[in-house]
Amino acid sequence: MRESSGESGEHHEMGESARLLHELERSGEYVFHGSPDGGIAELEPRQGTMTVDDVEQEDGLPPGIATTPHADLAIFRALTCNLYGHTGFGLRDDGTPFMEASKSVLDTVKGQTAHVYVLPKSQFAPATGDEKEMEWRSEAPQKPIQVVAVTDRDLPTNIKVIPGEIKERTP
């Protein structure tokens, strides 16, 4: 069992779900979609959004199913995607994922359960065409191979704590 400490300063042992998802990630055969909802039989393409200056807007890409080859990003998004404000994620220049969230977000996800959908990578393509891209998309409906329940115990330990509070979404 791995025990690690991260930028959040908290120590915890990696959860079983995170171990399973990391094993699937290492195979290179899967992509992951995080969601608070665990009852989706088939994922359907949707218009992606992004937040600019606290306003949510379309991302400019065709509707699709957004996934990532990085299990930690999917776990993070599954648990935090409905908590607007003061979260961030992406890839560093070296291709490793980073995540950041306010203490209020990290406190809110404690005890929560969310889900990571495991899908065949062969049915998705990198959003930018770059194989090292963080986001892979499919414009066709997809049935998951597996759905894995995740909790705050499965969050990566290297989440950077940033200032801020949870706030209401601005349409």
Image (cartoon, helix red, strand yellow):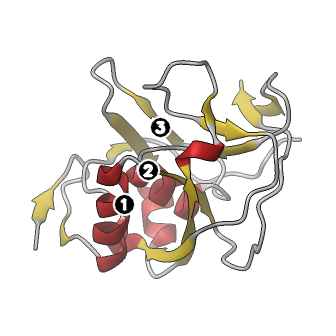
Of residues 4 and 52, the one drawn nearer to the viewer in this rendering: 4
The crowd level at tag 3 (other Cα within 10 Å; few <14, some 14-19, many 20+) is some
Q: Residue at x 36, y 53 (%)?
A: 25
Of residues 76 and 119, the one drawn nearer to the viewer in this rendering: 119
Camera-nearest label, 2 or 3: 2
Mark pair 1, 2: CA separation: 7 Å
Q: Which residue is mark 1?
A: 24
Residue 28 visible in the shown view: yes
Q: Quadrant of the C terminus?
A: top right
Q: Which residue is mark 3?
A: 89
Residue 85 visible in the shown view: no
Classify mark 3: helix, strand or loop: strand
In this view, which residue lies farthest toward the front? Answer: 122
Classify mark 2: helix, strand or loop: loop
Residue 44: x %, y % from top left = 83, 55
The crowd level at tag 1 (other Cα within 10 Å; few <14, some 14-19, many 20+) is some
Residue 106: x %, y % from top left = 43, 61
Residue 49: x %, y % from top left = 78, 36
- Disc 1, disc 2: CB below 8 Å? yes
In screen coordinates, is 145 left or right of 76? right
Considering only vertical position in the picture, is 62 above or below 164?
Answer: above
Mark 3 or mark 1, which has the lower sequence index?
A: 1
Q: Quadrant of the N terminus?
A: bottom left
Residue 142: x %, y % from top left = 74, 57
Q: Residue at x 23, y 70 (%)?
A: 14
How many numbered callouts? 3
Q: Which residue is mark 2?
A: 29
Considering only vertical position in the picture, is 66 above or below 74?
Answer: above
Classify mark 1: helix, strand or loop: helix
